[in-house]
Image (cartoon, grey):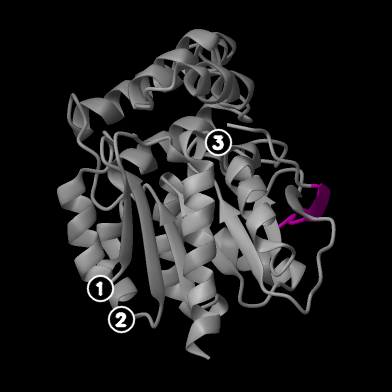
Amino acid sequence: MAQKSLDLQEKTVKMLDWTKSGDIYYYESQDFDTKKPTLLMVHGFRGDHHGLQFVAEEFAELDQGEHNIMLIDLPAYGKSAEFINARNHVAAHYADFLNAFLQKIELESPIMLAHSFGTTVLSRFLANHSGRVAKKVILLAPIAKRPQLIFGTGVNNAMVDFVLKLPNKLTHSIASSKFVSDRVSASYSKTKDRRIYKNVTKAEHRKYFGVFSSMEAMMSGLKSSQTDSISDVIADLARADKDYLMILGTRDKLVTIDDARWLKDQLRAQMTEITDLGHLIHYEAPDEIARRVHEFLGEEKKER
């Protein structure tokens, strides 16, 4: 996969009512023009804006400047500060934050794209603020229904509470270690291209999977990522006047094909299945994702 180039300018906005230090970091294309539509990308659990940058770069090459591109570091990840209450890093609170963020930077009707836990956040945002965004919505590896946990929700929550009682320095060191990031990469990556796995998926996880502000914030998000899903607000999404595009890998461990097809029917969505890839399609097939998104957004022009 050839490395593409996209010039992004780093920007910050103070949100003192929401975060401890107030600083939220986001990144937008250098040629940002308020007269053009904006594609806003929302990363998943334990990611930051780098996770979707490959997709952004591929899309920018196809788009040739017709859209602004914006990526965000959600609170507690990347450079962004965490919420005032560290236990509020859950899908519903992130959704309300997104609404406040759009108001703060005065961004009107962005086209929304989200990956994984980001789709859970986006689903709650759309359930309550659907009028704030454009008609077209893109869901990458959408969390259609609650993921199946090995030990069950009760045991899993007890494990989270136990970890939070351990020394923070120790648990933070373990959770952000290469050992943990490599295990996650191996578990969720399904690409047969070892160069992509080694040089992109594994390398990117090692760089950014451990960049979170605190264990309490991260574990709060972990609970939410394992108990919340799009299905919780499906009636609201089905009523929203939106056109949905879903893109997922056929070997995704968190999103079964049956659950994805159920979601497709509920949302009357278009769906693209990428053969033999898993949950980390944004690393392993950014070119294919960008091409499909570009086609999806181009449909509106053809209809005019």
Name which quarter of the figure residue 279 lies in. top left
Between the C-alphas of marks 3 and 1, the distance is: 28 Å
Q: Relative to 28, say whether 151 is above or below.
A: above
- Kind of residue indicated by mark 2: Arg
Which residue is nearer to you in this view: 137 or 222?
137
- The residue segment tinted magenta is 7-17
Q: Relative to 139, say whether 170 is above or below.
A: above
Between the C-alphas of marks 1 and 2, the distance is: 6 Å
Q: Was residue 133 drawn as part of the magenta stretch in this picture?
A: no
| Residue behind mark 3 | 47
Percent coordinates x, y for residue 212 in the rendering: 61, 30
Q: Which mark is residue 239?
A: 2
Q: How many marks?
A: 3
- Kind of residue indicated by mark 3: Gly
Q: Residues within 10 Å of mark 2 (few under 14, many from 20)?
A: few
For the point 26% across and 73% down, the residue is 268
Disc 1 element: helix
Task: Name the N-terminal-most of marks 3 and 1.
Answer: 3
| Residue behind mark 1 | 235
